[in-house]
Amino acid sequence: MDIQERLELLKRNTQEIVTEEELKKLLKEKKQPSVYLGTAVTGRPHVGYFMWVLKLADFLKAGFKVKLLLADIHGALDNCPWDLLENRYKYYSIVIPAMFEAVGADIKNFEIIKGSEFQLKKEYMFDVLKMSTMASVHDCHKASSDVVKQSESPKLSGLIYPIMQALDEEYLGVDVQYGGLDQRKILMFAREHLPKLGYKNRVEFMTPMIPGLTEGGKMSASDKSSKIDLLDSEKEIRKKLNSAYCPEGEIENNGVLAFCKYILFTIKQDKEEDFLIERPEKWGGNLVYKTYKELENDYATKKLHPMDLKQSLAKEINSLLDPIRKKLESKQDLIKKAYSE
């Protein structure tokens, strides 16, 4: 795979790269660059996480070393109870690799890192304090506003969060940080403030947010009706999709279509498979789609009905999640400890 092919793979399903020229330079100059994504161990992972699992799989294919930061301390800074952190870290450390396996990713150059293993060291904490003397309250609040849970009486922890995330780039020794578009303010905070400590800027990489299954907003672990949990049963998945916001003929803010576009068809493309919509002959018979664009066109012109799409998508999601559910069957005690609600 040459540099242009690697670049095109990385740009697939990507919203913004700051900057693309820096990324090109990195690909030319470094044999094996490194990228990290951080996820706070808060709510239970859901199918929206496949967005970044698939993009990290692209980085792996493009010859990157991939580091996944399971950010336990960040979880606490975002209101996860301290006594649940360890069990939630253990849950994430099992379920996320299972997601990579479910999409067929080669993870020999993939590494999981626990945040507290390096974030409590003297040098790191000194840099946290040092950056706190350079970053204003306004800058820290702005950076964290789309990521940290907001309240009428905000905690100081929300202001520490972006400082630590910026420093993670340096202490993980990576060339690229990747996150969803909701991370943009924090990623730009890192580019602004790391040089003040004498550290280099990294390439900042963002993919779109997938709308939730309810009208408005993103797929969120804190809103059960907006997302499909990785451990939801087949019956639960069908029920959630059947009631999902998916107006006939409407493309914008349609979480069902967005999942098809960014996740289902990415998996299908990599496996060189088509998406089959099963319909009775009286309604026109089966439909077969090789690309998302074909499906979107039929949906927009109302040749494809929402219920037919939902029922076929439910089968695809159940097939994708089945090996993950099986892997977690013996972990019920851990799940209860991590998520007692």
Image (spheres, rainbow, N blue to C red):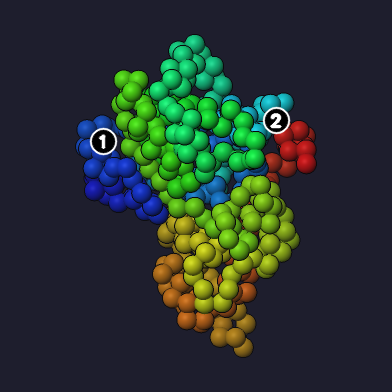
Dividing the image into 4 quarters, which one contains the C terminus? Answer: top right
* Real-space Cα separation, disc 2 to disc 1, in angstroms: 39 Å
Q: Is residue 150 above or below residue 192?
A: below
Q: Residue at x 51, y 13 (%)?
A: 121
Question: Left or right: 184 with respect to 155?
Answer: left
Front-most of 182 and 293? 182
Residue 247's quadrant in the figure? Answer: bottom right
Residue 113 appears at what percent x and percent y?
Answer: 51, 27
Residue nearest the observer in this picture, 101 or 242: 242
| Residue that numbered label 1 is attached to | 26
Q: Residue at x 26, y 35 (%)?
A: 26
Q: Position of residue 130 (x, y in %)?
A: 43, 17
Helix, strand or loop for disc 2: loop
> If the image is split into quadrants, where does the N terminus sit?
top left
The kind of residue on which mark 2 rests is: Pro
Q: Nearer the viewer, residue 128 or 234?
A: 128
CA neighbours of label 1 inside 10 A, class few (<14), some (14 to 19), many (20+): some
Position of residue 248 measured from the top left corner of the image (x, y, whole percent): 56, 77
The residue under the point 33% across, 45% down is 17
Say if 307 sits above or below 44 in the image. below
User: Residue farthest to the top?
Assistant: 122
Type of amino acid at the residue the image marks with label 1: Leu
Task: Mark 2 or mark 1: name the one nearer the start of the chain.
Answer: 1
**Quarter location, residue 64:** top left
- Residue of label 2: 81
Q: Which mark is residue 173?
A: none
Q: Is residue 27 left or right of residue 78?
A: left
